[in-house]
Image: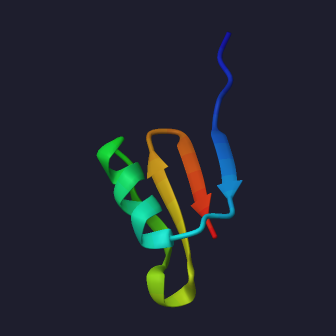
Amino acid sequence: MKLGAFSVSLSVKDIRVSKQFYETLGFSVFAGGLDKNYLIMKNGDALVGLF
């Protein structure tokens, strides 16, 4: 069964710590920015929004 694209949005306590955590899992910043107080990170078809 193919699920296709997957995304989730998370309200996080410390966006910088969360960014580092997801980078260790192979995600990279796709959109947003720390200066905008949100990040969308991508790993293949998976997207994680950090707010």
Residue found 56% across the figure and 83% down from its top: 37
Figure quadrant of residue 19:
bottom left
Residue found 48% across the figure and 57% down from its top: 41
Image label count: 0
Q: Is residue 1 above or below residue 23?
A: above
Q: Quadrant of the N terminus?
A: top right
**Image spot of residue 40 (x, y percent):** 54, 63
**Relative to 36, 20 lies left or right:** left
Q: Spot the residue most to the top.
A: 1
As rendered, which of 5 and 49 lies closer to the eye? 49
Q: Is residue 34 above or below residue 13?
A: below
**Image spot of residue 43 (x, y percent):** 43, 44
Q: Is residue 36 above or below residue 30?
A: below
Residue found 47% across the figure and 90% down from its top: 35
**Relative to 34, 4 lies left or right:** right
Residue found 66% across the figure and 45% down from its top: 7
Q: Is residue 15 above or below residue 2?
A: below
As rendered, which of 25 and 43 lies closer to the eye? 25
Q: Spot the residue most to the bottom.
A: 35
Q: How is the image coloured?
A: rainbow
**Image spot of residue 51 (x, y percent):** 64, 70
**Image spot of residue 18 (x, y percent):** 46, 60
As rendered, which of 12 and 49 lies closer to the eye? 12
